[in-house]
Image (cartoon, rainbow, N blue to C red):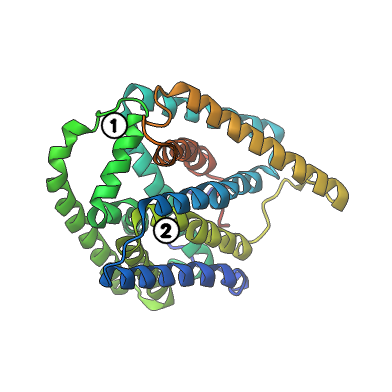
Amino acid sequence: MMSTITPGFVPSWHRIGGGRPSLALSRGTLLVLAAGFGLLGVAGISIPLDAQMVVYLVGMVALNLPHGGYEHFENLRRRRPDFRLRYVVGYLAAVAGFVGLFVVAPVLGLGLALIVAMAKGGLGGLHVLEATVGTGHLRTRPQRYLAAAVRGGAVMLVPIVFWPETFYSFSSLMVGLVDPGALAPYTSYFEVTRPAIAATYAGGLVTHIGLGYARGGGRSWLVDAGESLLLAAYFAFVPVLIAVGLYFPFWYSARQVARTNHVRDDVGADQWDLLGDNPTTAALRAWGIAVAGALATFVVLGAIYLTVPNPLAGVELLPGAVAFWSVFISIIALPHILVGSVFDTDRGIWYVP
């Protein structure tokens, strides 16, 4: 039985070689974006906020959302019907619970949304590392959790430090979907929390890289250290809306494809495959499942839209859509992690045999 973070994983030789285009694409894309926006910053050139919001929505809606459905599909395709039913029920229950929390306590809901984004990036990234180059330099469970925290923390903690105004503005809009102004009482603490977050994350990053070198080093450490530094630089130099909007499709999703290509397809229960062996039948079923998944997603989206008091936070369409989508994607990502991985210890969305 595989735990969410398994110490001492070393990939077998047959996994090395597949999925490299996805890894090269993700690393190269973030490197180019970080360097390009870094140069723009030096030149004093800024990107209009409207353009940043459009990039965010395109990245998160058109590019990243379909991958979430793909992860669920891959996880469920060879499972018994009773498992699939429990999975769906658990997923909907988690969605309902998160919506309830956000409506009753929007500031707490915002905090959970930030944690969800970091957990998804950090845990998912660690499983990619396991499948592609191994994690021999991560010798203990706390060290592995630190690695996940550093990778995931880059997604939200680094933008808080380098892009505070944009981060806090849209955080206020997210809370404003339920209670406009609810974040205002906490603004006086921002000047204290920002340097504290900067020091904590920098210390965690240095500790993670140094400890990994001391406990084994090697190729896995080199890749891990390089990617950790790349993530920190990317979220420091790229405006937060663009950074988050492009991170999930071009880093998280692309790298999960690489992980899928590396791991063995030995997941058992072939008799329960949703697609079947006949190519025509498989194509029709895949189309039907995709349509059903899309419809179910938009039903959930509509239900959340009708539940929150101010679905566009009382502002113009574009910033309101960014705020609403940020809340929506966090709500459906929570069970994505809990039900699809943490509670599914045999084979979850980040399966590594």
Q: Residue at x 47, y 68 (%)?
A: 29
**Residue 244 visible within the image:** no
**Residue 170 visible within the image:** yes
Q: Residue at x 35, y 43 (%)?
A: 115
Q: Which mark is residue 316?
A: none
Sequence-earlier tag: 1 or 2:
2
Residue ID for mark 2: 7
User: In the rendering, at what x and y percent does residue 15 appear?
Assistant: 60, 69
Q: Secondary structure at mark 2?
A: loop
User: In the rendering, at what x and y percent does residue 214 appear?
Assistant: 28, 73
Determine crowd level at label 1: few under 14, some 14-19, many 20+ residues with C-alpha closer than 10 A: many
Q: Which mark is residue 107?
A: 1
Please count the marks in the image. Answer: 2
Q: Which quadrant would the C terminus be assigned to in this image?
A: bottom right
Report the side of 349 relative to 266 (left or right).
Answer: left
Q: Secondary structure at mark 1?
A: helix
User: In the rendering, at what x and y percent does residue 244 appear?
Assistant: 41, 53
Q: Quadrant of residue 125?
A: bottom left
Q: Amino acid at mark 1?
A: Val
The residue mark sitting in front, 1 or 2, is 1
Q: Amino acid at mark 2?
A: Pro
Q: Nearer the viewer, residue 227 or 187?
A: 187
User: In the rendering, at what x and y percent does residue 121 appear?
Assistant: 42, 53
Could you tell me how far apart the alpha carbons at marks 1 and 2 are, in whole angstroms? 35 Å
Q: Looking at the picture, does residue 3 appear above or below residue 314?
A: below
Q: Residue at x 40, y 53 (%)?
A: 52
